[in-house]
Amino acid sequence: MSIQSILAGFFIVTFSILFLFILAEGMLRIISWFKREFLIQEVSRSDFLADEYQDYLQRVEDWSKPMFFYFPVGFRLFNLDNPIPKRVKNNSLGYRCPEFLPPEKNTKRIVLLGGSAAWGSGSTDNSTTIAGYIEQFFNQDKNLLGSYEKAECFNLAQLNGTQTQDILSLTFFCNQIQPDLIMSFTGWNELVTSHSFNEKLLMKFNMFYINEMEGWEPINVTGNKTKLLKDSLSLWLNEHFELSRKLKSSKSSINRKNLDFSEMVAKRSQIFKNQLKILNIISSAFNAQHIQFLQPYLYRKKYLTEQEQNVVHLYDDLRPVHGGQKMGDFLRENNIYESMKKELLSNPEEFGPVHDLCDMFQNEKETKYFTLVHLTDSGYHDVAKKMINLL
């Protein structure tokens, strides 16, 4: 066989594959266009969430720059170049609170730890976050201040944060802030959204980790350049080609796992208890008291407003990132903190004071939630007031 014949055969095969690809891609695009125009109404997460919450959502979905800056010790900090809602005011490290300066004389200092709900996703401004309200309540009540003249509340919470981040935040910043009281508003990220975490990693190290850093290795490790190139190409194809998206969707649906939610929560509760012990020890080491508040979530609310019904519909049926309706039913029927509450409450010397706020909105008829855990200003106010009343 001559070289010309081989080359001719090669070009024919290549052209045929390219032609079939273009044909398949073209047909899929026409089908997708036809569905969008005549058969279905496209919706996004923003269509189901309140107008007042949209700029917070935009921040989470904006991938133009990374949300976090990663300090090499594994400590995650806010990326100051990442766009934030105008109503959010940060200090020079990106935390939603004053600078970490030495305390003024006769000033009571409070630290709030937690994830995005503690950070204040959905709040009108810094004053209507849990930390903002707590500071107001202390400064309005001489009995709360005691011998102090005023109070400051430092919000060390992070979006997607867990107790592990809180432990690091206290370790690095507690000496600067010198708090008298440390309050954790956590539970959801640790017990629910961690369902996607690697089970072996969680159990081996008995701590929650930064999931976007899972499996990270230096690029110079053998094979990593090829792997990164393949991963990048896969993402690029999914962004630009219907055929690639269709193939990936089919593959992911085959690999989807059925979670045992009760077992999942039980395992993560063991980690939660261990890390709560550590938080209590660190707080004591800095001469501060630590108080744990287990956060509420929308599924436990009996009387849902239209806005809240839209949120449940979104996560039950359209965006089942937490397990869809099956997980929703489990969360509606169960207080996820129940299995560990007895041990937490009966061992204050190990865990410190613990308060369960899971069902505080159970019989509430007004709108309190923007998302499954993010609250309205009224919701944050009620949480802060409840925390103050329980002190």
Image (cartoon, rainbow, N blue to C red):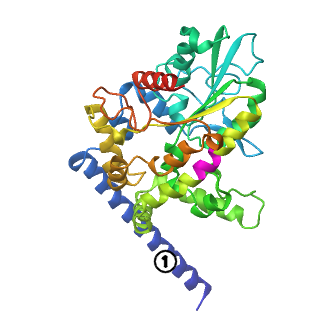
Q: Residue furthest bottom?
A: 1
Q: Where does the image place residue 40, in percent across and percent down from the top left?
A: 24, 48
Q: Is residue 43 visible?
A: no
Name the residue tied to disc 1.
13
User: On the picture, is 364 further left or further right than 215?
Assistant: left
Q: Where does the image place residue 236, in percent across and percent down from the top left?
A: 54, 54
Task: Identify which residue is drawn at 40% across, 46% down.
Answer: 335
What segment carries the magenta color?
271-276
Q: Is residue 197 visible?
A: yes
> Considering only vertical position in the picture, is 27 above or below 366?
below
Nearer the observer, 172 or 121: 172
Q: Where does the image place residue 98, in percent across and percent down from the top left?
A: 67, 18
246 falls in the magenta region: no
Q: Where does the image place residue 54, in percent across and percent down from the top left?
A: 42, 29
Nearer the observer, 301 or 376: 301
**Dominant secondary structure (helix, strand or loop) of the stretch shown in magenta:** helix
The local crowd at label 1, few if under 14, some if 14 to 19, many if 20 or more residues have their Cα within 10 Å, is: few
User: On the picture, is 300 further left or further right than 280?
Assistant: left
Q: Amino acid at mark 1?
A: Val
Q: How many marks?
A: 1
Q: Which quadrant would residue 375 be assigned to in this image?
A: top left
> Considering only vertical position in the picture, is 325 above or below 251?
above
Task: Identify which residue is drawn at 70% across, 27% down.
Answer: 93
Work out which quarter of the rendered image holds the N terminus and state it: bottom right
Work out which quarter of the rendered image holds the C terminus and state it: top right
> Considering only vertical position in the picture, is 14 above or below 300?
below
Nearer the observer, 107 or 366: 107
Task: Identify which residue is drawn at 43% across, 58% down.
Answer: 262
User: Label 1's element?
Assistant: helix
> Considering only vertical position in the picture, is 112 above or below 1?
above
Task: Identify which residue is drawn at 67% across, 10% down.
Answer: 147
Q: Residue furthest front?
A: 346
